Image (tube, rainbow, N blue to C red):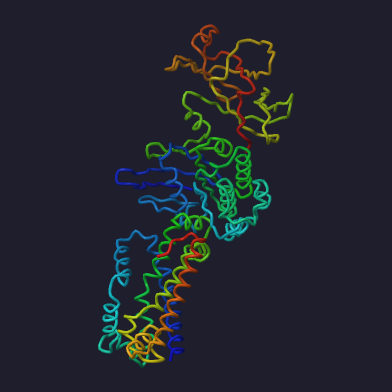
Amino acid sequence: MITSALFLTLKLALTTTLFLLIICLPLASWLANTRSWLKPWVESVVALPLVLPPTVLGFYLLLLMSPQHPVGAWWQSTFGQTLAFSFWGLVIGSMAYSLPFVLQPLQRTFEGQGRQISEAAYTLGASPWRAFWDIRLPLALPGLVAATVLGFAHTVGEFGVVLMIGGNIPGQTQVLSILLFDQVESLNYTLAHQIAGGLVVTSLLTLFSLYRWNSHAAVRVG
Amino acid sequence: MQFDIRHTITANNTLICRGEFSPGEKVALLGNSGAGKTTLLRLLSGLLPSTQGAVTDAGVPMGHGWQNQVTLVHQQPVMFAHHTVAQTIAYGAKYNRVHALPMSHWLQRLDLEALTDTSCAKLSGGQAQRVALLRALATGRRWVLLDEAFSALDSARLLAACDIVADYCRLTGAGLVVASHQEAPQRFLCQSAYLIDENVGRYEANVFSALNSRIEGQLWSTLYVTADQIEHGFLRVCLGDDPLYVSQPEHWQEGHARVSIAAGDVSLAIGVEHQTSMVNRLAATIIEIRPREDDRMLVSLDVGGQLLRVLISPWSCARLGLQQGQAVFAEFKVGAVQWHGQL
């Protein structure tokens, strides 16, 4: 039981972080450089998960994923299963929930580079695409590491969204935090202690190594 | 490169620049700080789109910074912290498929040889500036724009950097636009000038007349001469048939050279006199005598077909009985002659 929950949690966190990086790299790069009137709107929407109760997010996502909604219906007709109460439903929920934790460190790093870094690359003949891969991304490595670690750790630690849209199906949607809740409800304190203690220690070690490394890399996180 | 730009910087601040630099032309960009030199350079390099107007190069509209044939060295050298010096210069050469350039020789001339494996994040200001210059030259692009690119270099390095830029222009036929608060690089490298004054730019065909007229109270004349040989520890240059002596410069070769003389350092004499110390003496004809507001007389002389301006007191003027068309001798000390390089 605990092994399958642990495996599922890691799989969910890895998948979520990977997809978030794919979305957030271009988005952060755009936000760092744009002067568009859209910028504060995008920033506000992206930061919403920081202030909203996860249940609010979960509630709307659940409605969106239900077969009665066009999005949920499309998913069901394409993939032959409902999005809610499935692994991919969890991935989408986790992405919404952890988005600011991946986006913000990346955005701060790109902002810190200033426009001159790109300009210098352009004057050497590098297109914006090449300048991004050859110069800006390697220079953003500390921010990239911070974003990855925070996105991963935050996904491991989520509860509300997962419970709302994933439920508690062992092997499918039962991640560690849900299993912990389940064990406490059924007064199984021994297993609850193992899970809770394990999460505290690994999270602490992860954050410690990040901040420790970051003090060398001289980039602020969070 | 042709440009006709009206660029709105702020609501009531519009930079108006119109002009044409011919291929391979070396232009000094002049103007007080805040005049818009950096803005113009960014516009010419395609990094900043102008709000109105256009820049073209060889008849084609100037594309974005990465598409055109212009490279720019920023005022604050931009270093890519994840590169070593060798890597960053190789990155400059990455898109250069035209010119093979003596980069290792230039690295050596700028004392960067020992630093090739050093991280760009660890360079001092002067080192970064030299690396940024070489990285830009490695592109082999047709125009090199330098925005205060020599500001952190000491005089020996400045000279070497100027030599390398001149070498680059010779090898590639590239043109140059140099903005600099020091005059030395412009006097060494440039032929013509572009002045920005109160947001309006204008072209001046001779860099020296542009630079000389900017030195307040001091009027300078620049003479084109031929460097000849070392004599008595001085370099002898020839202005027509007349010899002229200058302090021996660190680097020189036989051939064309330029020297400048301040108007206040020249005195006028009539008739041949024997000099005891090493004094330059040029036969001249008076073109014009004009009184100035500061109670001195500005005498324009023709020396071997070139203009030499001299400031003397009205008293000397009257004592010598100077008049237009008269033959005189212009005399000045060796130390008064400034060496302004060879191209």
Foreground residue among B256 and A149: A149
Outermost residue, bottom direction?
A80
- x%, y% of residue B219? 51, 24
- x%, y% of residue A29? 42, 64
Does A165 appear above or below B197? below
- x%, y% of residue A45? 30, 69
Q: Quadrant of the image for the N terminus of chain A? A: bottom left
Q: Residue at x 25, y 88 (%)?
A: A68
Foreground residue among B4 and B257: B257
Q: Which quarter of the figure has residue B224?
A: top right
Horizontally, is B75 left or right of A167 in the view?
right
Q: Quadrant of the image for the C terminus of chain A? A: bottom left
Q: Residue at x 44, y 43 (%)?
A: B37
Does B17 appear above or below B334? below
- x%, y% of residue A60? 26, 80
Does B103 appear above or below B290? below
Q: Residue at x 46, y 26 (%)?
A: B216
Does B137 appear above or below B13? below
